[in-house]
Image: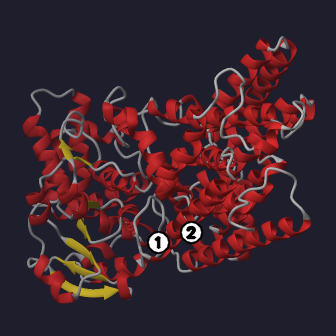
Amino acid sequence: MPLDQGISPVDAGPRQRIWSLGCLAVVLAWFLYEFHGDVLPRDSFSWMDPYQYFDFARTVRADPGQWNQFAVPSLFPFLLIPFLQIRDSVSASLWVNATSALVLLLVTSRLLPRRLRNGVPLLALLLLSSPLLLGLSRTGYVEFTLTAMFAGGMLAWVRFLESGATRALLAFAGILALGFMTKMTFPMYFFLPVLGGVVKAFWDGNPRRAVLTGTALVLALSGALVVQHQLFPASFPYYTSLGNTRIPIMRLIGPPEWMSWDSSHYCFTVLARWGLGWIAPVWFVVVLAPLALRKSGDGHSKGLPPELESLPPGSADSEAANSSRTWIWWLALLGPLVLLTFQPVKEPRHLAPCVVPAMLLAVEGVNRWRNRRVRGAAMAGLGVIALTQSVALTRSGREIPYLFDQPTHFPEIRDQLFRHDPLGDFYRNTPNQFRALHWAHNQNVILDGFSSNAALSLTWQLRPAIVFDRQVLEAADRASDQIPYSRFEDLFFLTSFNAYNRRAGWHAYLETLSREQVLEHATTALVCSESREQAQVRYPDLQWVGEVGSGESTVQLLCQREIKGATYRQLYAREFLKRASSLSSIEQNTIAREAFYAACLAGRIETAQRKLERSPELRNDQAVRNIYWTTGAYQPLHRQVVPELFARYQEELPGAGD
């Protein structure tokens, strides 16, 4: 296509359609090629959520009778099962995202008016080079698939508004219900577009359409809740807890204060930085500049191509029809940004569907310039920036949320560290299924030199070890101990959220232990992209025991030579008790139980005996507060391994036979 033609505002000829399809095929081939290379070596996910989907999909595949036992209301695991039938692996499950990418591009191409169909390759390139979508396409989160579902819902909604067809409304209601059962935040993305459509119906004197819309949507959402309650009872409490956002500690993801400057611009900044990426400055020019050039009085844009001014008002490609879709894109873009600003949990993936209306507005903005050369230059500029951005993100190792394209080699890391642990024989007395968890429980781990996504992945896999990311310790913009010392929590939970926030671009530090304490009491260090000698210099008190991986992902392993010092858990509990002026009985029992568990799992049975004598109510779970909800690994470890260890070793205590 000649540069001076840009996106043709009239129906394209066969040659242009072939050219457009060829370009789209090239974009898809490039995406699938890069995608395959990224996911092929993957052996892990980056956090709890993808593991939940993956593990449940494997469970259902092995035992179909478990199909309704998932604790999270999501249909996403059922989409993974066909891919796991081909190969039971992390990398195979990620191909659900390749399918979602095809659906996303197919649907968004239909969202463009006919006169903009030659812009489909540009739209595809813009979407697939968005840092946010590019990263999410390489991980096991639901949001990439949810974005494709969102695009399908927008297509059905637009067709209903333009035609008034009942079947289009039913299609939209069906997609809304399925999306609601895939992730409970799904209706939020349609809040303003639907509200705008209802208001417009009343404004146009068509209350019947407004009532029909409201009835269909209420029935869709309530029907989804009924189905969820009846067929998936294990996950229904997730709805009543508002997606666990009622848990106070959940406000630690992103800016914690609702009404603060950081919260107010977080979503908008994230969308510009990671949703649009490098095209953000150009996006504002091509989208907003034509709006600033509007004439007064005639309702036409000064930037409107002259070909459109001659179209009849009732045409599907007329300015009236074009404006109708444009305001829908704006409502779909701004609605989630505003609503998520007031949501307590803030992280980039929740904004993924916003990329679709943002990129549709970009293509529409290019078309609104009158001059064909300007349109062609704008289109070429967006395409070049998007392509350059994509290559930079996939080839240069630039960090963006969720883009995680290397194996962690965690099983090998864990096995080597376990073999060199001074207490190795003690852990071998534990039943096999609990041995790794038992070993990890009292480990003090430092991660050094890892990308934010890899660091978070290792943090989760090392649970329940207490893991500190040195990059967080040394690069945090702000540190606060107010939340960690206002209520006693599981320390893994607090420290892991530091790594979680680093990935989300929120460089704040929940200060539990000082940097000096972390370095002094470390029992294990994993150092990435350093030589053995460099790692040993950085951690002279630890012993080098081996390395895993190769190239830029080489990890040096260091661990303590002998048992010494306190665990991070002990240090946190001591400091908490030192600072507390008064504690409720439940809080005191919670801390005592944590110390009792830690003592048993570390083989300090005399200490455990003294704690049990002082607090016999520890045997009653009702007398304590649950602080281990982050990971299900804690409960079987504490309820099965701790009593067994305590019973086995308390006979060896002095005076036990008296």
Q: Locate the C terminus by quadrant.
A: bottom left
Picture disc at residue 387: 2
Residue 363 position in % (x across, y down): 67, 50
| Residue at horizontal 62 percent and vertical 35 percent from the top | 330
Q: Vertically, is 520 above or below 534? A: above
Q: Is residue 294 visible from the viewing direction of this image?
A: yes
For the image, the number of numbered tags is 2
The answer to whether residue 220 is left or right of residue 420 is: right
Crowd around label 1: few <14 · some 14–19 · many ≥20 (10 Å): few
Q: Secondary structure at mark 1?
A: helix
Q: Amino acid at mark 1?
A: Ala
Q: Vertically, is 270 above or below 335? A: below
- Label 1 sits on residue: 392
Q: Nearer the viewer, mark 1 or mark 2?
A: 2
Q: Is residue 169 visible from the viewing direction of this image?
A: no
Q: Locate the N terminus by quadrant.
A: bottom right
The answer to whether residue 527 is left or right of residue 390 is: left
| Residue at horizontal 12 percent and vertical 53 percent from the top | 514
Residue 386 position in % (x across, y down): 56, 63
